[in-house]
Amino acid sequence: MTDETRDLWNTLRRHTSARIALGRAGVSLPSARQLEFQAAHAAARTAVHSELDETALRAELAGLGLDLLSVRSRVADRSEYLRRPDLGRRLSDADAEALDGRAAPADVAIIIADGLSALAVQDNVAPFLRAFLPHLQREGLSLAPTVIAHQARVAIGDDIAQRLGAACVVVLVGERPGLSAADSLGLYLTYGARRGSTDADRNCISNIRTGGLTFPEAAYRAGYLVQEAFRRQLSGVMLKDNSVSAPELEDSAGAERISGE
Amino acid sequence: MPGFSHSIGGETFRFADLRTLMARATPLRSGDELAGIAAATDVERVAAQLALADLPLKHFLTDAVIPYEADDVTRLILDGHDAASFAPVSHMTVGAFRDWLVSDAATSEALSALAPGLTPEMVAAVSKICRIQDLILVARKCRVVTRFRNTIGLPGRLATRLQPNHPTDDVKGVAASVFDGLMYGSGDAVIGINPASDNTGAVTKLLHMLDELITEGGIPTQSCVLSHVTTSIEVIEAGAPVDLTFQSIAGTEAANRSFGVTQDILQQGLEATRSLKRGTVGDNVMYFETGQGSCLSADAHHGVDQQTLEARAYGVARLYQPLLVNTVVGFIGPEYLYDGRQVIRAGLEDHFCGKLLGVPMGCDVCYTNHMEADQNDMDQLLTLLGTAGVSYIMGIPGSDDVMLNYQTTSFHDALYLRRVLGLRPAPEFEAWLDETGILASDGSFTPNPTPPALFKTSLPQMEHS
């Protein structure tokens, strides 16, 4: 026996991922639905607070022939990371100095930043790079050292690229987890990145994950953006992605709402 | 400026200017810490509150937190101040003003008459020395009633915005969520979609879909596609059925410019929308959203605390006689409001300040997954706001916005609040819910177990089992 009342418009669920036709107990959520939500929220929270396992990541990247470095932002811990976005955009003093010592002209620097979901980085960076690196090779573009950045936000890539002497930076970063996916990887491309570059200077590809934008598709779009950025020597609002007709390239989370980042 | 000071236990705290005094007096929140303007200690904060309590309300008419010459929001606040309405409280300090607000002398009628005489800085200042129960007690006495196709803000009523967002603006996907919401009695404040793209074609398509639904269903409510005001003006000129024009606004000229708006553009939006004369019981046609932290996020805060800037946004809003204004209180992120405790206080402050200024205040009771908050925090804020007489809240399927990736109140949550506090929908919408059999009007809110027949024609592409 149950006091749950089901909704009769279940079939509409095939039109949307929204949580419609949940049914009710009285006017409240049925227990199963309530706990389903709690499970999704717990997964998202776990992703936000997850630590990047660098050893495991390096093992996965081992076959790709990358020259890997590791840096930290000025953030001490996760709580400070969430409160102080400014510190997550800046390199620790020691790492800034170390990168200065590695300066050498190169076309592209790839930065792997934990961002708001280390889980996204752990799951998706290696398969994405396996699909993406051949696009760079085809263009004959040289790679700076690839930098794994802990407690980092997107703009840390500007500082890194400037210190390494890279013309273009590609930052792979864990996106803010939603209830439906806690492991979305974002890609931000900035040509001529320097400390003080803004979001208007960047192009973004969002929702890279199994079940989202596939690795070959994301790699193709990223390859197109890199190619066009070098051809036109710019990135950001002046560089439209005409490789696809789908609108989902834009980071929709900021659309007509005030946004924190 | 001479500055301000207050001594506690032999220690004297000095505050260089009004904006510093206001910032130090603000209950702790991460955004003011990020801006480097928060009080360093709890004692300093109370010292600032004590100094602020001694400040005459009149002081705010001669000392601006952002200079008159530098900011058009300051200019509209000071130029638009109504001295006659202000007269009954013009002799009071901030502390005496709080005493008066919570007293029986401050009736609903007195507060309505006073609103044009209050500036955002005055209400922000008094909110800083209020506890949560004061914020509730006073806001509950305020009456702000607005109208378009129904009446929002009457006592004992709670409206909801039905928010049927979809990741790609798919018309069937949006319609499915609209249907779900209507069946749960949601949508009297507005059926309002945040579009994934600001493309005029996509926006127009959604506007037509909502217009047909509202017309065919005879639903006494209004629609809105929350695109940029310039997009709304453009689609109005092209003949699209726009009920309400939306815009995000903030409390400084520079922040509004970062949103791509000026007071002139907002005025154009108001006039274009009113020219369509689509309202049946009133012509409040604007819908504004705000949120603490937006000025800091746009690097346009002038060293002013985020709560005072938020109140200034309501000062902008009231110029355009909006139908709806809501703070999106937990959306912006933990660097502005860190946890449930900060969000709850901010939501109640925003509602209090908006209502005192005469703005039809609702609240998006919400959080993101990187904030230290959960459904329990939202239940608390929701229940407190309902007690405070909030004009409307959001309604979304299962609390999960699959487009904006955050959590807000669900259709079920609104029914809970109505049931616990005995709150009813807007009267015109309530009559429609009764006629269609979706919700009985005998006080027992029971969503209809079977879809009413009218949706079979108005949503022909929707199949029912």
Image (tube, grey):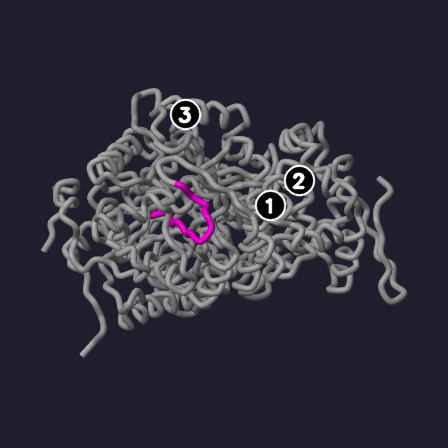
Residue A104 position, x and y percent, is 52, 45
Q: Which residue matches tag 2?
A: B118
In percent of the image, x 37 and y 67: which residue is there?
A43
Q: Nearest the camera: B133 or B394? A: B133
Q: In 3D space, how far apart are the residues under numbered discs 2 and 3 (Cα atoms)?
A: 27 Å
Percent coordinates x, y for residue B381 in the rendering: 49, 61
Q: Quadrant of the C terminus of chain B?
A: bottom left
Residue bearing mark 1: B356
Q: Amino acid at mark 3?
A: Arg
Point out the stretch of residues depicted in magenta.
B151-162
Secondary structure, mark 1, is helix
Q: Is residue B420 magenta?
A: no
Q: How many marks?
A: 3
Left or right position of B61 against B460? right
Residue in view at x 77 percent, y 53 percent: B53
Q: Which residue is mark 3?
A: B274
For disc 3, the neighbor class at 10 Å (few under 14, some 14 to 19, many from 20) is some
